[in-house]
Amino acid sequence: TIPEELLEVQLKNQMLNDDGKAEILLRGSNFVVADKPPTVVAHHSSWTYTRSDPRGRWKEPTPMLQRVRDATGKRVNLIHRLDRGASGALLFAFAQDESENSERASCSTTKALIDSMQSKDATKTYLALCDGDGSWNDVDYLNKGWFTF
């Protein structure tokens, strides 16, 4: 386990190096893919900005939804989420476009992308960098097939 003091330093360093901007990886006519750094939430929720931290160490970074909106100049809909501590690519659909039926078109794009991500045929790949032997709390996750080397 990482000592709390070291974890605190790592979090502060990541937040200090965070410029609050979204790195756009790919942009299409109806969608955008952005790189989500660790420590940044995908969107506001009932518990963001209310984390209990008596020492005042935590200042919430700007959520990805707002970052991508600011970077593209358009409202976006989040298609899927990643946990706060995870980093990776996030997919967004534009909530508006320039066509006459922009609201209907953006809703159908958002729905199609969400449906495709939730499909049993969708392939999602996760990569975790870990230190240890694959066991935690006396459970051997390596032998349970949760991950491979």
Image: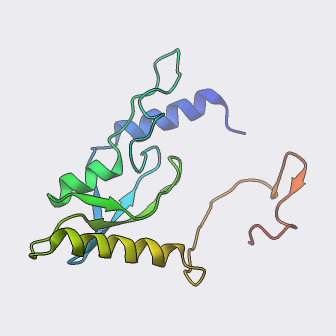
The residue at the far top in this view is: 54
- Dividing the picture into quadrants, the one containing residue 17 is top left
* 75 or 86: nearer the viewer: 75
- Dividing the picture into quadrants, the one containing residue 76 is bottom left
Q: Is residue 50 above or below residue 15?
A: above
Q: Position of residue 148 (x, y in %)?
A: 75, 72
The residue at the far right in this view is: 138
Q: Is residue 51 above or below residue 126?
A: above
Q: Is residue 77 above or below residue 38?
A: below
The quarter in which the N terminus is drawn is top right
On the rendered structure, is 128 left or right of 96? Answer: right
* 142 or 16: nearer the viewer: 142
Figure label count: 0
* 73 or 6: nearer the viewer: 73
At a point 55% along the width and 78% down the height, the residue shown is 119
Q: Position of residue 9 (x, y in %)?
A: 51, 31
Q: Position of residue 115 (x, y in %)?
A: 46, 75
* 51 or 36: nearer the viewer: 51
The residue at the far bottom in this view is: 121
On the rendered structure, is 143 left or right of 97? Answer: right
On the rendered structure, is 23 left or right of 102? Answer: right
